[in-house]
Image: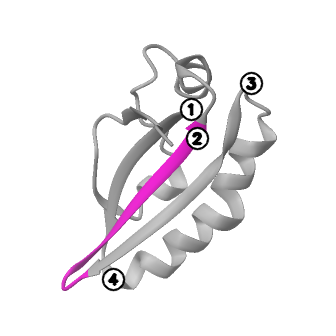
Amino acid sequence: MIARIWHGWTKPEDAKTYEEMLRKEIFPSIAARQIRGYHGAELFINEVEDRVEFLTLLRFESMDGAREFAGGDGTRPVIYPKAEALLTRMDERSRHYRIAI
């Protein structure tokens, strides 16, 4: 199993809107794509003084699924234009880890 990790940051006043967009629009639209080997998403939020960090973790059976999701080498972030407007900073590449449980 592969964990695809990506970080994005918002201003505190945009955090709730971004969180709702992830939960209600973005994650469901990823699931609707029916990517082979996709096993769901998790969201982690860290509120720090002047910013809010969002860490997304998408699970795939293999790197093939991550590449199908993102295209190319699979490390390109997939940013929805509506969401990008809320982000003040973001990772330029996603990282992938083998889940060893």
Q: Secondary structure at mark 3?
A: loop
The answer to the question of whether label 3 and label 1 lie on touching residues, with beta carbons closer than 8 A, is: no
- The answer to whether residue 75 is left or right of residue 22 is left
Q: Which residue is mark 3?
A: 36
Instruction: Verify CB contact (< 8 Å) between mark 1 and mark 2.
Output: yes
- As rendered, which of 76 and 42 lies closer to the eye? 42
The residue singled out by tag 1 in the image is: 1
For the point 65% across and 66% down, the residue is 23
Q: What's the mark number on residue 59? A: 2
The residue labelled by disc 4 is 12
Are there few (<14), some (14-19), or many (20+) residues within 10 Å of tag 3?
Answer: some
Asked whether, in this view, residue 101 is left or right of residue 21, the answer is: left
Residue 82 lies within the magenta run: no
Horizontal side of residue 74 vs 33, given as left or right: left
- Please name the predominant secondary structure of the magenta segment in the image: strand
Q: Secondary structure at mark 2?
A: strand
Q: Residue at x 49, y 57 (%)?
A: 83
Q: Which residues are magenta?
A: 48-59
Does residue 57 show up magenta in the picture? yes
Q: In the rendered view, would you say 61 is above or below 7? A: above
Please tell me whether residue 28 is drawn above or below residue 31 in the rendered image: below
For badge 1, the amino acid type reads Met
Marks 3 and 2, how far apart in space? 11 Å
Q: Residue at x 28, y 45 (%)?
A: 91
Report how far apart the C-alphas of labels 3 and 1 lie in the structure: 13 Å
